[in-house]
Image: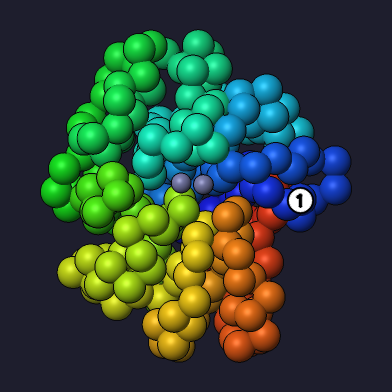
């Protein structure tokens, strides 16, 4: 499975635009799922174009939570791909242009190797991807808490990787068993995580591609 960061607070690949927010493309099971949509449609679509990513090739969109920096690009994307399926936490207000909305409450199987943790406290869901080397968990801001997210994801197997925004997270020992950590977007204590886990923690940024399994 492959994760390509499209939208992030920082840039990895020169030429891409950085802006506050998060979005990444997850390719698994022959699907192209877009996790979150960043804060602005213009930046999202511009970065997608530079990365040679056709908005119409996206089969589904997974929205972690209703904050603007994750939902902001959705309307522009729906204009180009109106029939795309959108997985939305149940408490999140429905975007008016979305046609195929799937309201997520409990844990959910999206495809053979793709799952949602279900809506956790603070109205956020995380994406769980089964790979040959363990589970990869992708999170938006981690408002429910990294401990809660990892614990909930464990119902699907052993968590090996964590990618996304770790807002306010400081309970570093929780990451000890992971093989890959990519703390990006709103992570305030990125430097501490990198220093504590120099072998497993990597930087994120728009344009970064991570292949697992
Ligand atoms: Zn955020
Ligand atoms: Zn948030």
State which quadrant residue 201 falls in: bottom right
In the picture provided, is 195 more to the left or to the right than 169? right
In this view, 17 is above or below 26: above
Assign a secondary structure to mark 1. loop
- Give 31 or 96, whichever is nearer the viewer: 96
Left or right, 75 with respect to 65, comes to: right
| Farthest residue, direction right | 14
Q: Position of residue 209 (x, y in %)?
A: 64, 56
Specify whether 120 is left or right of 133: left
Q: Nearer the viewer, residue 177 or 169?
A: 169
- Label 1 neighbour load within 10 Å: few <14, some 14-19, many 20+: many
The residue sitting at 50% across, 65% down in the picture is 168
Q: Residue furthest left?
A: 106
Residue 16 position in % (x across, y down): 78, 40
Q: Where in the figure is residue 11, as x and y percent of width and height? A: 76, 50
Q: Residue at x 16, y 43 (%)?
A: 105
Q: Is mark 1 within 8 Å of ligand 1?
A: no
**Tell me, what colour scheme is on the image?**
rainbow
Q: Is residue 153 left or right of residue 6?
A: left
The answer to whether residue 128 is seen in the rendering is no
For label 1, the residue is 11
Residue shown at the point (33%, 29%) measured from the top left: 86
Quarter of the image for residue 69 reads top right
Viewer-closest of 105 and 101: 105
21 over 82 or under it: above or below: below
**Residue under the image location 34 percent in, 53 percent down:** 126
Residue 76, percent from left and from top:
55, 17
- Confirm whether residue 7 shows in the render: yes
């Amino acid at each position: 499975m492959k994760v390509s960061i499209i939208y992030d607070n920082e840039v990895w690949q020169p030429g891409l635009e950085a802006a506050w927010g998060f979005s990444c493309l997850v390719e698994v099971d022959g699907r192209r799922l877009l996790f979150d949509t960043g804060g602005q449609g213009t930046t999202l679509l511009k970065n997608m174009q530079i990365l040679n990513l056709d908005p119409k090739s996206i089969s589904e969109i997974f929205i972690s939570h209703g904050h603007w920096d994750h939902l902001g690009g959705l309307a522009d994307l729906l204009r180009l791909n109106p029939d795309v399926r959108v997985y939305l936490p149940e408490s999140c207000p429905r975007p008016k242009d979305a046609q195929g909305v799937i309201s997520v409450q409990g844990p959910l199987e999206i495809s053979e190797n793709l799952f949602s943790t279900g809506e956790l406290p603070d109205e956020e869901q995380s994406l769980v991807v089964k790979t040959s080397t363990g589970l990869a968990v992708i999170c938006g801001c981690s408002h429910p808490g990294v401990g809660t997210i990892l614990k909930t994801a464990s119902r699907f197997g052993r968590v090996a990787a964590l990618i996304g925004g770790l807002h306010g997270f400081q309970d570093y020992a929780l990451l000890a068993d992971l093989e890959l950590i990519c703390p990006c977007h709103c992570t305030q204590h990125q430097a501490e995580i990198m220093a504590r886990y120099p072998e497993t923690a990597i930087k994120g940024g728009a344009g970064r591609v991570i292949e697992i399994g």
